[in-house]
Amino acid sequence: DGGITQSPKYLFRKEGQNVTLSCEQNLNHDAMYWYRQDPGQGLRLIYYSQIVNDFQKGDIAEGYSVSREKKESFPLTVTSAQKNPTAFYLCASSILGTYNEQFFGPGTRLTVL
Amino acid sequence: AQSVTQLDSQVPVFEEAPVELRCNYSSSVSVYLFWYVQYPNQGLQLLLKYLSGSTLVKGINGFEAEFNKSQTSFHVRKPSVHISDTAEYFCAVSATNDYKLSFGAGTTVTVRA
């Protein structure tokens, strides 16, 4: 059954700690994306990657880092430099070269205590 | 760059009544347009999309939308809603020569019995 998995679903972190959110897809998609969702603000792009070992900053990359060592995996690290990390984080993937229909994972809700 | 404005942040509606969600976009190039639906604490699911051709597109769960190039709009409608349509709805746009999506702020639809 193809899809995108994100783990964990809920994550709590103390201020000053780094935390890594997992995103895995078995759709054989080339591109992967990370979004942040805050109430009333829609989705904002953090990072995206078109190919293994390459990624680009989105609109709100400060305080975040990513890696793309495998096609199916795109983990996101929320660092202590992110000043307001409490949010809902969504991972997505898409095929390149066609219209950009993105498929989304179920999300991870991060709360900083 | 592309941008999206969803004209209503909240839409309350009674069960079996019609609903229309309004979306305007801005772009200097040709675009693809999307509506996504998000149920509470879940990821996004594609509701419908406009790529080219007929300006009237049908989606899942009885929704349909009309692309109006002259008015730069992509409003979505459903003639009779159910309680299960309670969700947040996002309009999104991408340039046809790009693969990144720009999202609107979202419209929360609450269906009451």
Image (cartoon, coloured by chain):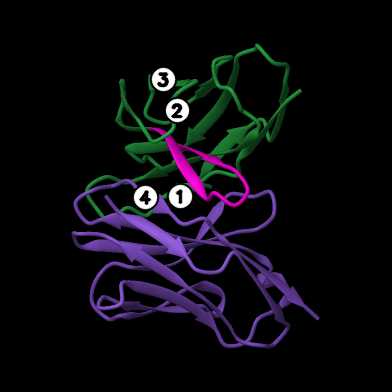
Q: Earlier in the sequence, mark 3 or mark 2?
A: 3
Chain letter corresponding to the colour green: A
Answer few, some or many: residues within 10 Å of disc 2's Cα (few below 14, many 20 plus, some between 14 and 19).
many
**Residue A2 visible in the snapshot:** no
Q: Are marks 2 and 4 on the same chain?
A: no
- Disc 2 vs disc 4: Cβ atoms closer than 8 Å? no
* Residue drawn at point x = 58 percent, y = 22 percent: A83
Give the side of residue B33 with respect to residue B82, left or right: left
What range is drawn magenta here? A34-47
Q: Nearer the viewer, residue B54 or A63?
A: A63
- Mark linked to residue B101: 4
Circles 3 and 2: CB atoms closer than 8 Å: yes
Name the amino acid, label 3: Ser
Residue A61 makes an appearance in the image: yes
Q: Cα distance, mark 2 to mark 4?
A: 18 Å
Above or below, A23 relative to A83: below
Residue ranking furthest to the top = A16
Query: What chain is tagged by disc 2?
Result: A
Q: Which residue is mark 2?
A: A74
Q: Is residue A71 above or below residue B67?
A: above
In the rendered structure, the residue with mark 3 lies on which chain? A
**Which of pointers 2 and 4 indicates the residue nearer the eye?**
4
Tag nearer the camera, 4 or 3: 4
Residue lying at 60% horizontally and 14% vertically, measured from the top left: A18
Q: What is the C-alpha distance between the residues marked 1 and 3?
A: 19 Å
Question: Of the residues shown, which amino acid type is indicated by label 1?
Answer: Phe
Mark 1 — residue? A103
Near mark 1 (Cα within 10 A), the count class, few <14, some 14-19 or many ≥20, is many
Return the disc, 1 or 3, that comes first in the chain's sequence.
Answer: 3
Q: Colour of chain B?
A: purple
Answer few, some or many: residues within 10 Å of disc 4's Cα (few below 14, many 20 plus, some between 14 and 19). Answer: many
